């Protein structure tokens, strides 16, 4: 079956620090990969996505590259802000049934 | 575009009563809607998948008779928690997929259910 494993948190950083959240996956086919962000008290928002190997998704300074050889989709941001404090979820979508499988989520807190 | 709304955003009900949560796709037609449950500080657990005009498909361990899902139109799905108990208190989130070969899901803001 499909599964997603992401780095456990919580992660606490200072403003302008570099952020990396590791994500690896197991899938039977060729999934699409996503990073979702959940701000306090809100629902999930799509942060970025990649649909095939070597694709790079990017948004709001965040980037992640679909690495088929290492089955990974690590999230990175070069300089975080306090407003980036949130829970980040790595997810994959099975192209057969379109179901999303989520990682456990990583709580990121950025301090001024 | 691709906005999904949920109503209500918060609801408090007494044990034994039923609660209905609505999920609407505001600017697109959603052939498939998904219902998730999220416990505090945990990931989302898929409860069921609903396709317009057909019965919902429930994930293993989810009680069909307790969590009634109706997807009556291409823009509306409802989740009814029947005979609610305190352990049903949770954050319920829906998502919608436009259909065809679109894999992307758009999430609603969630509904916080508290059963007293």
Image (cartoon, coloured by chain):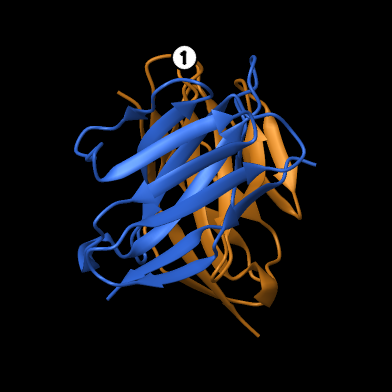
Chain colours: A orange, B blue
The reply to whether residue B7 is visible in this rendering is yes
SS type, badge 1 = loop
| Residue that numbered label 1 is attached to | A96
Whether B64 is drawn above or below A11: the answer is above
The x, y position of residue B95, in whole percent, is 55, 41
Chain at tag 1: A
Q: Nearer the viewer, residue B33 or A26?
A: B33
Residue at 65 percent of width and 22 percent of height: B102
The reply to whether residue A70 is visible in this rendering is no
Whether A18 is drawn above or below A13: the answer is above
Whether A15 is drawn above or below B4: the answer is below
Residue at 45 percent of width and 19 percent of height: A97
Whether A4 is drawn above or below B116: the answer is above
Relative placement, left or right, of B103 versus A81 is left
Which residue occupies the extreme right position in the image? B1
The x, y position of residue B100, in whole percent, is 65, 15
The x, y position of residue B79, in whole percent, is 42, 45
Indicate the quadrant containing the N terminus of chain A: top left, top right, bottom left or bottom right. Answer: top left
Residue at 33 percent of width and 61 percent of height: B39
Q: Nearer the viewer, residue B67 or A111?
A: B67
The x, y position of residue B35, in whole percent, is 44, 42
Q: How many marks?
A: 1
Indicate the quadrant containing the C terminus of chain A: top left, top right, bottom left or bottom right. Answer: bottom right
Relative placement, left or right, of A29 versus A88 is left
- Determine crowd level at label 1: few under 14, some 14-19, many 20+ residues with C-alpha closer than 10 A: few
Which residue occupies the extreme bottom position in the image? A112
């Amino acid at each position: 079956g499909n599964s997603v494993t992401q780095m456990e948190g919580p992660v606490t950083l200072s403003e302008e620090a570099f952020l990396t959240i590791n994500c690896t996956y197991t899938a039977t086919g060729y999934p699409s990969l996503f990073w979702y962000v959940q701000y306090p008290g809100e629902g999930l928002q799509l942060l970025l996505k990649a649909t095939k190997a070597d694709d790079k998704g990017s948004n709001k300074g965040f980037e992640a590259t679909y690495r088929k050889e290492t089955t990974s989709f690590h999230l990175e941001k070069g300089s975080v802000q306090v407003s980036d404090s949130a829970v980040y979820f790595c997810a994959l979508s099975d192209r057969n049934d379109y179901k999303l499988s989520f990682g456990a989520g990583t709580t990121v807190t950025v301090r001024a | 575009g691709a906005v999904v709304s949920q109503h209500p955003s918060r609801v408090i009900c007494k044990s034994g009563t039923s609660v209905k949560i609505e999920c609407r796709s505001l600017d697109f037609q959603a052939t498939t809607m998904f219902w998730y449950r999220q416990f505090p500080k945990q990931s989302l657990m898929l409860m069921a998948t609903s396709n317009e005009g057909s019965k919902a498909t429930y994930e293993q361990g989810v009680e069909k008779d307790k969590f009634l899902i109706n997807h009556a139109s291409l823009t509306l799905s409802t989740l009814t928690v029947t005979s609610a108990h305190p352990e049903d208190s949770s954050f319920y989130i829906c998502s919608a997929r436009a259909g065809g070969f679109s894999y992307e899901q758009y999430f609603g803001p969630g509904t916080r259910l508290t059963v007293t």
